[in-house]
Amino acid sequence: MDAPVAQRLTDRFAMPVVLEHDANAAAWAEFRFGAAAGGHVVVLVAIGTGIGAALLLDGRIYRGAHGVAPELGHLQVVPDGRTCACGKRGCWERYCSGTALVDTAVDLLPTIRGRSLLAREAAADPGALTGRRIAGAAQDGDALAVAAMAEFSRWLGIGLAAVADIYDPELVVVAGGRVRFGIPVPRRRPRSLRHHPHRCRAPPARADPCRAPGGCGRVDRGSGSRPRPGPRRQDRAVRLRCWSRPSV
């Protein structure tokens, strides 16, 4: 259905209204008010039921030739892997998202059963497994939940390493509902990112408050300077300091 929604809202509220992709809007908010302020090459990765993404170049949203770039969640990371709604198999979001976390926990059930309260709950009621439930159980040290979160972190690192290789960004902002509501961005670089053989070689990361309204985590590949102080929030930021390896 093609309707002039933005114009109708503009007329109704007597102020300019623009309809925008949620990841693009989040990236713009971080650029104007939060973690990406002043960044020249910024990637936002939004982790929810899937993975959304946005790319900012010198403060402008990059949309690609057909207005849909960048679809990072549909980068294939596992050939012939899990089926994705896009029609492909093995997409990144099928291994690093709220939905993927549940699928990972189900895959791990046979190896964990008997050593996990969450596993016993899932055996009795498969619907009991949710991303939020798994994240909460991981904080309590549940074996199944900890294993599922470790896989989530591993795939997060693998994907961010690919993002760094493709775009060479100053920073990556990690956001999205699954980060905000209980699936944490690791406070240190994911091991798979630390060990990935690309030019991001970094000292340990530091957790700092995020500043954009509704913002979440930040993975910083820039100069390493501290952000300006902002209000304390429940959401936390993760800074990843990196520098480029000299060309040979």
Image (cartoon, rainbow, N blue to C red):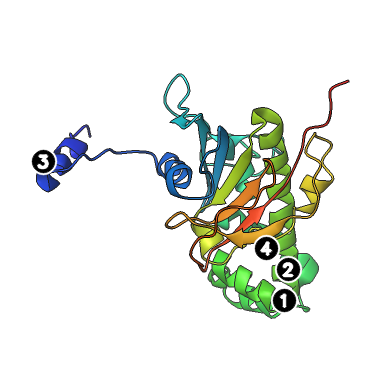
Residue 9's quadrant in the figure? top left
Nearer to us: label 2 or label 3: 3
Residue 25 lies, in percent from the top left, at 40, 42
Q: CA distance from mark 1 to mark 4?
A: 12 Å
Q: Amino acid at mark 1?
A: Asp
Count neighbours of disc 4 (C-alpha within 10 A) and say few if under 14, some if 14 to 19, many if 20 or more.
many
Q: CA distance from mark 3 to mark 1?
A: 53 Å
Q: Residue at x 49, y 50 (%)?
A: 34
Q: CA distance from mark 2 to mark 3?
A: 51 Å
Label 2 belongs to which residue? 146
Q: Is residue 194 left or right of residue 55?
A: right
The answer to whether marks 2 and 1 mark residues whose Cβ atoms lie closer than 8 Å is yes
Q: Residue at x 60, y 63 (%)?
A: 183
Label 1 belongs to which residue? 142
SS under mark 3 = helix
SS under mark 4 = helix
